[in-house]
Image (tube, rainbow, N blue to C red):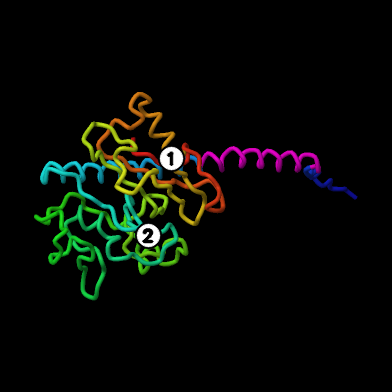
Amino acid sequence: MTTVSQPSRPLLRAFTLIELLTVIAIIGILAAITIPTVSGVRNSAKKTKTRIQFTQWSAGIRTFKQVYGFYPRFEVTGGKHKVNGSLAYNGATLADEDYRFRELLSGKGAKSIIGGFEFASAEKDSSSARQNLKRQTFVTFDISEVVSTTGADSGDPDLKADGALKDAFGNVDIVVLVDRNNDGFINDNDLATGVSLFPPVIARGGNGTLTSAMVKARIDASDPKKNGVRSDVIFYSPGKGSGNSPAAEISTTEAVWSW
């Protein structure tokens, strides 16, 4: 009787516990390196987008001055030097005068009504305080710059004020300053009557505050001899924030500055 030998099967070798733990550790190290890098890239991209916004808005303000011979005044009661007037970082509703920045530079009504939009601020036809008398468009605001509680932002609990302007981080607390005394610099001397400190700003969701003192330090450092920024228009916003409450201070590196 002939015996047929069966081919031997290769011996399967399993991973040892040490090898598995080594692989897991390597994956953890790679994740620790990659995730902050990706987050940093996104943050940098949003900062760049916000600076582009500020550049476009600044250009509109400069053109306004060329046309009318003076810088537009955006100050409203309780919201001096703010793009959205008196609106708080977590505000749900814009007061009529809070539309002033947008209406003044766009030359169009910004308050939503049935069938369209109407002027809400002092830029309405019946107001003697109108500044953009020619209804000229100095800035065309993109829909991505405007909060929509029925559109893209409808599911976002931090964006509540329909029609407010926002930066790339979703912040609505944004400051604008212009060279009121025409000396070529922006500093304390350009603050509105009754304002003694640079306005602080709070990040979206209450994730920290960029304090008045930090803003002043940044502005003063731009030109130590003049204690100011060599510009005619500047903006700043809190960026992504760096805390989990308004009491936390945002570092100047996290904030977004137009200069």
Residue at figure coordinates x 30%, y 46% from the top left: 192
Q: Which residues are magenta?
A: 16-38
- Residue annotated with mark 2: 87
CB-based contact (under 8 Å), mark 2 and mark 1: no
Residue 4, how many percent across, how many down?
84, 47
The answer to whether 90 appears left or right of 80 in the picture is right
Q: Residue furthest front?
A: 194
Residue at far left of view: 134
Q: Which residue is mark 1?
A: 44
> Is the residue marked by circle 2 packed among few (<14), some (14-19), or many (20+) residues within 10 Å?
many
Most extreme residue toward the right, as rendered? 1
Q: Judge whether residue 3 is colored magenta.
A: no
The quadrant in which residue 113 appears is bottom left
Q: Is residue 29 magenta?
A: yes
Q: In the image, what residue type sits under mark 2? A: Leu
Determine whether the residue tagged by mark 2 lies in a helix, strand or loop: loop
